[in-house]
Image (tube, rainbow, N blue to C red):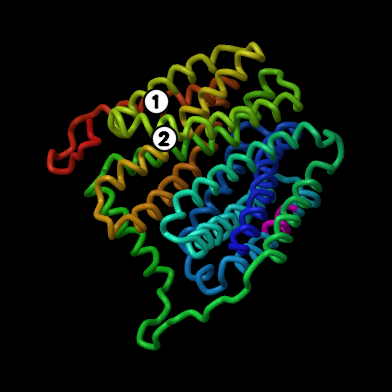
Amino acid sequence: MRSLTGLLVGYTILIAGNSLLTTLVSLRMLEAESSALDVGLVQSCYFVGFIVGAVALGPLVANLGSQRSFISFGAVAALAAAGYLFFGAPREWAALRLVTGFCMVGIFTSIESGVNGAVANGKRGRAFSLYLLLTFLGVSSGQMLLGVCPKAGDADRIVVNALFLCAIIPVALIGEWKQPAPKIAASSPRPTLSQRAAVLFDGLRVLLRAAPRSVPGAIGAGLLSSAFYALTPVYLARVDFPTSDISQVMAVAVIGGLLSQWPVGKLSDLVGRRAALGTVSLAAAFSSVLLVFVRTLGVVDVLLFFYVALTFTFYGVIASDANDRVDEAQRVSTSATLLLVFSIGGAFGPALASLFMKSLGAGGLYVFSLFVTLGLAALSFARNEPRARRTTFDR
């Protein structure tokens, strides 16, 4: 259990640094007069690295163990964060974002494997609830730090680098370093990259057969999540929010995502996954319409809070619906495949949303969100799935 404490403390600090870095990249590119399209393309590279890591890093984390993996990938992520002090061109920042995304997959994998290995079955749900709570705590703390950092100079990027480095310390000091040797039989060679990719494609085929709407649904959730993190700071800056207010708005909005998880999950249990997703999607679409036109500071704060509270629940409802429809033996592969599909949506979200902003101005971000949320609502209410695949939650 001591190893889990160190991992979770380090993880929270690192998530704060990663959250701060994501917003800083958008704002500093905007200050350098980069276009919204350039910002979107650079931020999309984070999810490209995430996808590559999701395919490649599982066996490496299993061999190194949770602590060693966290420290290794955290150190590389810290080196990438230091790169923003020396490089300033969008092409160079795109490469750094790709490296960061790749490392974050290794960190997420090490945390989740550490949680699974450190707690008994009866406590795993509570452990993962704590993991989710710390994720949102780290994200909101990182956004709040944006208002504390001086705007001029490199102090903000130094703070990011310090957070990445500080995250390694509790993992190194509070941990049980007994890592069992991997048990690999001589007749069972390590899977190749192509074989691991084939496993992911098998998981995708299972999802398309058992819960076909979960795949476009997860892509939609990824589109919205990545576009929000990457381009909402640009949206706020272009509607004349001061930088200190941007950090506060982003932090409060993310807290909305935390507070809504349980109520929407409960709603999906009561009225059905599809009905809940459709209802929440329509409410998010309405919030998107208001965000296109409203420019009053206090009202935008409230609208963003409710927008995030709604859209950040999409993935959980979609994942629950998919797991209702697959066999128990397929649930691990289902979760891994859904995460990968979500990341694919995440890779395209900032780039596509930035095209809307280029054509329609700041409000184009939420025109993009309007299209995606209406698409999710239509997907939820459509009734063209074979009857045999429906469950008691398909209402």
Callout 1: SS: helix
Q: Is residue 296 magenta?
A: no
Answer few, some or many: residues within 10 Å of disc 1's Cα (few below 14, many 20 plus, some between 14 and 19).
many
Give the extent of the magenta segment: 76-81
Q: Residue 269 location, x and y as percent?
A: 32, 34
Report the side of 260 relative to 152 (left or right). left
Q: Is residue 379 visible?
A: no
Answer few, some or many: residues within 10 Å of disc 2's Cα (few below 14, many 20 plus, some between 14 and 19).
many
Q: How many marks?
A: 2
Which amino acid lies under the numbered mark 1 shown in the image of this protein? Answer: Val
The residue at 26%/27% (across/down) is 381
Residue farthest front in this picture: 122
Q: Residue 33 location, x and y as percent?
A: 73, 31
Please tell me whether residue 39 is drawn above or below residue 100 in the rendered image. Answer: above
Q: Is residue 79 magenta?
A: yes
| Dots 2, 1 in contact, CB < 8 A | yes
Q: Which residue is more in the foreground, 223 or 246?
A: 246
Please tell me whether residue 161 is drawn above or below residue 381 in the rendered image. Answer: below
Q: Residue 198 location, x and y as percent?
A: 34, 64
Q: Which residue is mark 2?
A: 314
Quarter of the view holding residue 286: top left
The residue at 53%/68% (across/down) is 61
Q: Residue 78 location, x and y as percent?
A: 72, 57
Please identify the quadrant where the N terminus is shown: bottom right
Q: Is residue 188 visible?
A: yes
The residue at 65%/42% (across/down) is 19
Q: Which residue is mark 1?
A: 280
Image disc number at residue 111: none
Rounded to the nearest whole Å, what is the CA distance between mark 2 and mark 1? 8 Å
Q: Which residue is more in the foreground, 8 or 362?
A: 8
Please identify the quadrant where the C terminus is shown: top left
